């Protein structure tokens, strides 16, 4: 059971192929703010090649929705990186 | 089945560069846009409604443009259903990477070659817009390319001007989400008239659902085909107010005919004596004749008001041939000219986002990563059209 | 051509072709003392289905004549009605000697935005000819619209093109300080309504026409509204609130691309 003053905390650690990719994911996802900032707090950071996301939410339902949306975004970024990462790495000139 | 049964989801590659008309003739007025010192390339990503599109455009040193590729994939819902934001976003997430890859292959360029990555900032549906922006950001960071956020409506207008060569037209922008009469003035696309309630495409889509028409390839297309068989013009409200229009009353009225005791859903008389009947085709015909007459009327009023002889029709409803025909008749009566496009450019596409984005990029505009959010509401007249005199 | 109205048109001079109608200068009789009239012919629109076109034309000519008569009875400055032939789409009204307000305001003179550079002095010169300051002109606009709305007539197409200043030479004032009067014209889209919504939309249409035709005209329109408010009295509060709503709806409209 939850009360309004209890915050739920969820931490997710997502390994990427490289530190650069983890940093790209962080920057791309960071741009869109959480829709209910009063009820959902999001902290994103990168340690080596791991993206670490921490969510503090007021309700279990919000935790589920927020994490779900976040993972969908991560999935899209990961697939984009997989698809275009090799091409991007091919020409690292200058 | 009276409707053409097209494959419901096919990757359709849209254009070959040789299809394009000659480049726009030189403008008389001094334009702030200088011819580029080298060729510029941009990729555009569009997904504000139920189509995901990607295209690559090239601007050449002589000031001409060339469409290198324009690929689109449409999310088609079953008859009777509209597209919901979440499902539409899922469609874009599933198809975007395939479409982008195909668009680069067709253009025979690599992401390294483009000067900027353009995406639709708005207006449109929130979740689909956000999904496409996320891909654009990831690509921008991965390839270290600048981002350009583009107003969807301005994309339609700029692509229309480029494809048709229209110089300074009155623009009728008609789609599932927008109905506007626009004209350029002082670096702004001013809205002279618009819908006071729902968009014309929304009115058509919703009526298609009422009579269970297929959404493939598009509900409006199927209404157009049905209307060709209609014979009876039924009275509907005709709602123009100045240069504005209203469609919700018409939708209610045309729906009401489906409860009329003369209405035959299958379009067939019950027996030889069943003469006084109303068919779905009659309703499609009456709906089209009424709403397109209203659109032509407000366009004509805007032309008279600003003294223009050119009309450019853009947006998904703009490929309706009856609308184009009516507009042509009006233009001939005024000794004017209509510029219209086929579905490659009328219906939402990525190339228009690339075109409008590259124009602003060449004027020095860039969207910083932190500002690359999307917005459901973004009026056409909010954009500073820096590239026009 | 068979009807008397069309014969009359054949004998008249075409003045302009607007979006709705061709406008002619005509005389009802050959008597030289007989004053000129303006003939407005709603010609057939080829793009419209004939049935729809016919019923729209009849309804609009009859509606326009009705609205003009209603305004005249209520003391609103509008052209007098001289003849009506709804079936042929012909309406004959008083010829107003004067200039459209659009041409008298900055930005409205040129057909093309190129001309705006030199239109401002032109507009100012023209206003001097009518001996009326811009602010007084705005007040006349607000007052006339208020008088019309108090008579429950909605114009339906309020723009600065649809208002004229009567030329001082043809204006016989009952008021010694006035050299001109504002005349509302083109009631082709007008209708009868007492609804607050319709009056608010009428004002909103004008507001948009101002901002799209005359750059930086916000203070001008504000002055129109002040005069309107004064004349409407107690009716203003509800209309003003609704105007806010209509503006909001306008902003929210472009929701989906």
Image (cartoon, coloured by chain):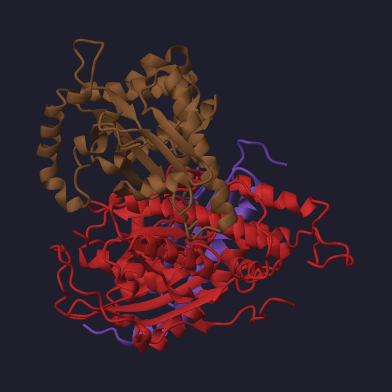
Please determine whether, in this image, residue A88 is positioned above or below residue C239.
below
**Count of labels in the image:** 0
Give the colour chain B carries in the figure: red
Judging depth in this view, the residue of B237 and A45 nearest the camera is: B237
Q: Quadrant of the C terminus of chain B?
A: bottom left
Judging depth in this view, the residue of B166 and B308 nearest the camera is: B308
Q: Is residue B208 left or right of residue B92?
A: right
Residue A59, given in percent of the width and then of the height, sits at 64, 44
Please determine whether, in this image, residue C228 is positioned above or below residue B111.
above
Q: Is residue B177 left or right of residue B37?
A: right
Residue drawn at (18%, 38%), measured in percent from left and top? C106
Residue A76, given in percent of the width and then of the height, sits at 52, 70
Q: Quadrant of residue C127?
A: top left
Residue B335, given in percent of the width and then of the height, sits at 33, 63
Residue C159, given in percent of the width and then of the height, sits at 34, 37
Give the colour chain A carries in the figure: purple
Q: Residue furthest front?
A: C31
Residue drawn at (29%, 34%), measured in percent from left and top? C36
């Amino acid at each position: 059971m939850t009360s309004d003053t209890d915050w739920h905390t969820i931490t997710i650690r997502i390994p990427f192929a490289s530190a650069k990719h983890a940093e790209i994911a962080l920057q791309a996802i960071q741009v869109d703010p959480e829709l209910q900032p009063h009820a959902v707090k999001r902290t994103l950071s990168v340690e080596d090649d791991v993206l670490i996301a921490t969510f503090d939410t007021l309700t279990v339902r919000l935790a589920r929705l927020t994490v779900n949306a976040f993972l969908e975004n991560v999935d899209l970024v990961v697939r984009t990186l997989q698809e275009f990462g090799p091409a991007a790495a091919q020409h690292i000139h200058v | 089945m009276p409707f053409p049964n097209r494959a419901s989801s096919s990757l359709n590659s849209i254009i070959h560069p040789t299809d394009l008309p000659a480049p726009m003739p030189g403008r008389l007025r001094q334009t702030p846009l200088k011819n580029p010192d080298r060729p510029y390339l941009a990729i555009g990503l569009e997904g504000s409604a139920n189509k995901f599109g990607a295209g690559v455009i090239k601007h050449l040193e002589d000031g001409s443009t060339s469409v290198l590729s324009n690929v689109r994939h449409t999310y088609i819902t079953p008859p009777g259903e509209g597209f919901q934001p979440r499902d539409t976003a899922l469609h874009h997430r599933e198809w975007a990477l395939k479409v982008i890859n195909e668009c680069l292959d067709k253009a025979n360029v690599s992401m390294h070659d483009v000067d900027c990555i353009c995406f639709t900032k708005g207006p449109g549906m929130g979740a689909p817009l956000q999904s496409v922006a996320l891909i654009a950001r990831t690509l921008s960071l991965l390839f270290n390319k600048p981002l350009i956020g583009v107003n969807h409506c301005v994309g339609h207008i700029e692509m229309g001007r480029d494809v048709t060569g229209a110089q300074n037209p009155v623009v009728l922008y008609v789609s599932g989400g927008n109905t506007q009469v626009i004209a350029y003035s002082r670096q702004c696309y001013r809205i002279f008239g618009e819908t006071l309630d729902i968009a014309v495409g929304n009115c058509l889509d919703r009526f298609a659902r009422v009579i269970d028409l297929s959404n493939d390839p598009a509900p409006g297309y199927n209404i157009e085909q049905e209307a060709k068989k209609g014979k009876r013009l039924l009275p509907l409200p005709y709602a123009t107010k100045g240069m504005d229009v209203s469609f919700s009353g018409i939708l209610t009225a045309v729906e009401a005919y489906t409860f009329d005791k003369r209405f035959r859903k299958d379009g067939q008389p019950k027996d030889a004596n069943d003469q006084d009947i109303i068919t779905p085709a009659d309703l499609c015909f009456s709906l089209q004749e009424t709403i397109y007459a209203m659109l032509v009327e407000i366009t004509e009023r805007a032309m008279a008001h600003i003294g223009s002889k050119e009309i450019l029709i853009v947006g998904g409803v703009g490929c309706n041939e009856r609308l184009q025909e009516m507009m042509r008749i009006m233009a001939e009566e005024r000794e004017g000219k209509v510029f219209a496009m086929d579905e490659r450019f009328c219906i939402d596409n990525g190339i228009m986002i690339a075109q409008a984005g590259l124009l602003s990029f060449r004027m020095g505009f860039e969207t910083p990563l932190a500002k690359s959010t999307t917005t459901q509401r973004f009026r056409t007249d909010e954009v500073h059209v820096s590239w026009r005199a | 051509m068979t009807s008397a109205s069309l014969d009359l048109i054949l004998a008249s001079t075409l003045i302009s072709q607007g979006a709705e109608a061709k406008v002619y200068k005509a005389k009802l009789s050959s008597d030289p003392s007989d004053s000129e009239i303006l003939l407005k012919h709603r010609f057939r629109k080829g793009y419209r289905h004939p049935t729809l076109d016919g019923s729209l034309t009849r309804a609009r000519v009859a509606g326009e004549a009705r609205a003009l008569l209603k305004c005249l009875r209520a003391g609103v400055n509008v052209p007098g009605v001289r003849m009506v032939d709804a079936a042929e789409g012909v309406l004959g009204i008083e010829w107003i000697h004067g200039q459209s307000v659009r041409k008298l305001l900055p930005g409205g003179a040129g057909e093309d935005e190129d001309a705006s550079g030199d239109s401002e002095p032109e507009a100012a010169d023209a206003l001097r000819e009518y001996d009326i300051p811009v602010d007084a002109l705005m007040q006349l606009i607000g007052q006339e619209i208020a008088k019309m709305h108090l008579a429950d007539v909605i114009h339906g197409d309020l723009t600065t093109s649809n208002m004229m200043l009567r030329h001082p030479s043809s204006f016989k004032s009952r008021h010694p300080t006035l050299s001109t009067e504002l005349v509302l014209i083109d009631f082709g889209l007008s209708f009868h309504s007492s609804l607050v919504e319709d009056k608010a939309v009428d004002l909103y249409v004008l507001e948009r026409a101002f901002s799209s035709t005359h750059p930086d005209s916000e203070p001008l329109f504000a002055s129109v509204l002040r005069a309107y408010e004064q004349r409407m009295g107690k009716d203003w509060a509800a209309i003003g609130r609704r105007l806010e709503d209509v503006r909001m709806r306008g902003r929210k409209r472009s929701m989906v691309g």
